[in-house]
């Protein structure tokens, strides 16, 4: 029997108090009947013992009330979000469906609940084991991808998830379940805090970071906290002495304002200590002064710059530390002027200048920004950022890939560049010309060959910097390549490149497929789709797209495909007459094929004097005089000569041992054979000339073809050479290996 869920006396008292507080806060946004329905629903599930505590033993009703108040106070959400939060425990427990909730409270509530339920199901279906916890993000990559897709449907879902995680982190300080505490803290630090920062929820972001540090690095957290407490009195006295003269000057100028000092978060101090490799005493900018001006919207910039002028007249400013987010706000709507000045006692102090409206946007992020959109619609590019994130999620091949791209998008640093017409564009730090090209349009990105930055021609790999004027250069012969994915930094560009590559692959595959069908028809070979799929698998391909791509790029020989296809086709035919398939017990597979054949069998002697036998040298391994070889009887009755170490030899021995014949070369090699060498080395000046020089000096060697591809300081190439025998080949390989810069050379 399930243990009855009961409120403790403290929980009952707390729940009633929270409910009254919440009711007062959102009364104006509720619709008639909302409160009665919600109260009856909560009373029913409690009385019928239909909810249960979570893994930390927390009361779900109390937790919901706490989260609801948090989203109202810190984010500014109202009716729909609050009702969804209160109904969520019932939906998770299966006591209420999303459709029922939507019917009772509206489609907006149903949409939020759908997102929250989807996320909860992901966590239940994919728990992280203790052994995997250090790599939990990799195992949960697909979960986070779906989580982000959920918030892309309704932004309030992710705002509620952030608030819920803040509330959870507050409540688990005394838990005995340290494993789960570590897990939720890692998630908070890795995903929720950066996401809160990107969305402008700086207060919640700082709290998530501090609490994560408290649970994950206990000693560091309390060391800094004790130091801050010990220096608080001196710090408060300094702030008072610093702001006193400023208050008088601003008041004399007729400005309405208020000021406050803000100490850096414990997490920020710890990060600075690690970055600068110093003790607590080595961190000088422990606090910032915030000046918040009360003025009409149309006078915001004027009064902010007036305040800036007054402060910089009083104290020496550091121009390298100035940040102007008034002229160009951040993508999340953040607006402020940041300056660092040299105050009394020669201490650097950061001063932030903003208005009341800007301060609310800074504290509550996008939620507050949306409220002011009618007043100041151009502030920030959050809608554009969200659009790019949705596009990235839809085109990502896997969760980890999506997670990595999303993490890059969460980075706070931004740069600003201009088009030739003077339009301003915003990108994350590290973005390249190619990112900008794809931002303009997919076709512009796919055709981009470079750019003119400040009238200087550069490649599309060039990194952009704030203030650059950029003109994209395109070419009709340009097309996207796989390596472009490592050049771009934005998820939007990555998504568009992947889409273009898929389209190119599909076109290539279609052309190769038609070419194969034509060649099969010319050879009067009936092509069977299922047999072709088996051929692909036997050749080591799991995906048909990879098979067609290698044929298109000439890394897989069409003749090899024919050989493998015919072997498989012959293996499916009924064997009659003397060619009865033998048991595997009759064969002993050794290094050389000759061991499979009785010693008194005839040996095929390969040479110019061979008459009446139709034989060819196999293209899959290109044997030459001196190689250990064997013959394979083909369907047409001819014989293919393979090297004993041919990649296809094991399969031929296993499936068609009865069709293998012993073979050896006659006399001395006099014919010339075509072989291909793969060469890898440093892309040094003259290295290719040195390689070809060695070959050209030998009169008995003929260089038929050379193909070199250089990339990132390395070159990869193939050399096709006509040669007499393998002895001469071994000597040639030894000579080529002596060339400076050659890293690897092998026969293929």
Image (cartoon, rainbow, N blue to C red):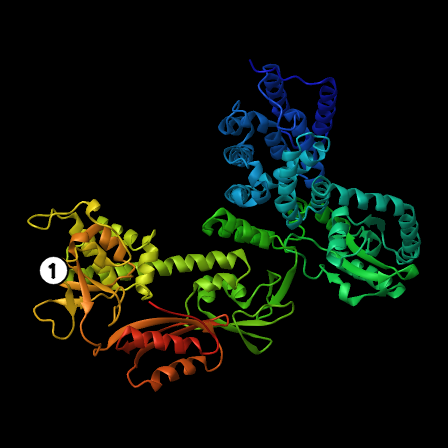
564 sits left or right of 328 in the view? left
Vertical side of 179 occupied by 309: above or below: below
Judge by depth and name the residue closer to the eye, 443 or 29: 443
Residue at the extreme top of the image, as rendered:
1
Q: Secondary structure at mark 1?
A: loop
The residue that mark 1 highlights is 636
The spot of residue 687 in percent (x, y) is 45, 80
Can I make out residue 94 in this image? yes
Can I make out residue 78 in this image? no
Residue at 30 percent of width and 81 percent of height: 701
The spot of residue 296 in percent (x, y) is 76, 52
Vertical side of 596 occupied by 223: above or below: above
The spot of residue 34 in percent (x, y) is 61, 25
The spot of residue 105 in percent (x, y) is 56, 28
465 sits left or right of 711 in the view? right
278 sits left or right of 739 in the view? right
Judge by depth and name the residue closer to the eye, 443 or 167: 167
Which part of the image, by quadrant, shows the C terminus? Answer: bottom left
Residue at 18 percent of width and 45 percent of height: 583
Judge by depth and name the residue closer to the eye, 70 or 179: 179
Judge by depth and name the residue closer to the eye, 400 or 691: 691
């Amino acid at each position: 029997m399930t243990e009855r869920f009961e409120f403790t006396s403290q929980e009952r008292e707390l729940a009633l108090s929270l409910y009254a507080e919440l009711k007062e806060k959102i009364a104006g946004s509720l619709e008639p009947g909302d409160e009665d329905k919600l109260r009856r629903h909560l009373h029913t599930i409690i009385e019928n013992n239909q909810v249960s505590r979570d893994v930390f033993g927390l009361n779900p009703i109390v937790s919901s009330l706490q989260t609801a108040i948090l989203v109202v106070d810190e984010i500014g959400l109202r009716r729909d979000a609050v009702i969804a939060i209160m109904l969520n425990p019932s939906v998770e427990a299966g006591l209420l469906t999303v459709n029922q909730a939507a019917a009772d409270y509206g489609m907006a509530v149903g949409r939020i609940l759908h997102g929250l339920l989807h996320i909860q199901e992901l966590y239940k279906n994919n728990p992280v084991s203790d052994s995997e916890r250090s790599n939990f993000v990799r195992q949960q990559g697909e979960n986070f991808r779906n989580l982000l897709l959920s918030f892309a449907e309704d932004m309030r879902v992710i705002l509620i998830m952030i608030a819920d995680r803040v509330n959870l982190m507050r409540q688990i300080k005394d838990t005995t379940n340290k494993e789960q505490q570590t897990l939720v803290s890692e998630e908070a630090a890795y995903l929720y805090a950066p996401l809160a920062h990107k969305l402008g929820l700086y207060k919640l972001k700082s709290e998530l970071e501090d609490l994560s540090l408290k649970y994950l690095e206990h000693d560091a957290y309390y060391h800094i906290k004790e130091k801050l407490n010990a220096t608080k009195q001196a710090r408060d006295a300094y702030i008072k002495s610093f702001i006193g003269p400023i208050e008088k000057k601003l008041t004399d100028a007729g400005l309405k304002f208020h000021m406050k000092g803000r100490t850096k978060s414990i997490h920020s101090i710890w990060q600075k200590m690690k970055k600068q490799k110093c003790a607590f005493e080595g961190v000088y900018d422990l606090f910032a002064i915030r000046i918040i001006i009360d003025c009409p919207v149309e006078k915001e910039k004027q009064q902010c710059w007036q305040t800036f002028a007054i402060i910089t007249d009083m104290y020496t400013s550091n121009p390298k530390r100035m940040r102007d987010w008034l002229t160009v706000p951040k993508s999340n709507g953040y607006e402020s002027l940041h300056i660092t000045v040299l105050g009394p006692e020669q201490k650097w102090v950061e001063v932030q200048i903003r208005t009341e409206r800007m301060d609310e946007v800074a504290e509550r992020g996008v939620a507050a920004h949306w409220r002011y959109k009618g007043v100041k619609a151009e502030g920030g590019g959050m809608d554009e950022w969200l659009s790019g994130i949705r596009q990235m999620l839809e085109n990502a091949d896997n969760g980890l890939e999506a997670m990595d791209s999303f993490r890059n998008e969460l980075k706070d640093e931004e740069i600003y560049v201009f088009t030739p017409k003077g339009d301003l564009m915003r990108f994350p730090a590290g973005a390249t010309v190619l990112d900008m090209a794809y931002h303009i349009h997919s076709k512009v990105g796919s055709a981009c060959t470079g750019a003119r930055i400040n009238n200087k021609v550069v490649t599309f790999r060039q990194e952009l910097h704030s203030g650059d004027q950029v003109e994209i250069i395109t070419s009709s012969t340009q097309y996207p390549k796989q390596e472009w994915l490592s050049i771009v930094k934005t998820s939007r560009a990555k998504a568009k490149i992947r889409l273009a590559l898929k389209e190119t692959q599909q076109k290539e595959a279609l052309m190769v497929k038609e070419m194969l069908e034509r060649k099969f028809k010319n050879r009067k070979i009936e092509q069977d789709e299922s047999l072709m799929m088996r051929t692909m698998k036997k050749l080591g391909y799991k995906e048909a797209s990879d098979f067609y791509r290698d044929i298109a790029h000439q890394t897989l020989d069409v003749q090899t495909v024919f050989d493998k296809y015919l072997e498989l086709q012959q293996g499916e035919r009924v064997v009659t007459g003397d060619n009865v398939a033998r048991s595997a017990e009759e064969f002993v597979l050794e290094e050389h094929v000759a061991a499979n054949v009785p010693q008194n069998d005839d040996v095929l002697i390969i040479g110019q004097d061979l008459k009446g036998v139709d034989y060819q040298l196999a293209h899959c391994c290109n044997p030459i005089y001196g190689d250990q070889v064997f013959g394979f009887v083909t369907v047409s009755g001819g014989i293919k000569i393979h090297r004993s170490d041919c990649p296809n030899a094991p399969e031929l021995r296993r499936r068609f041992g009865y069709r293998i014949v012993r073979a050896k070369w006659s006399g001395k090699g006099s014919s010339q054979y075509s072989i291909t060498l793969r060469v890898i080395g440093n892309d040094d000046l003259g290295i290719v000339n040195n390689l070809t020089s060695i070959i050209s000096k030998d009169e008995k060697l003929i260089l038929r073809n050379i193909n070199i591809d250089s990339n990132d300081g390395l070159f990869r190439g193939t050399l096709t050479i006509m040669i007499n025998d393998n002895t001469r080949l071994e000597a040639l390989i030894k000579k080529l290996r002596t060339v400076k810069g050659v890293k690897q050379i092998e026969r293929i």
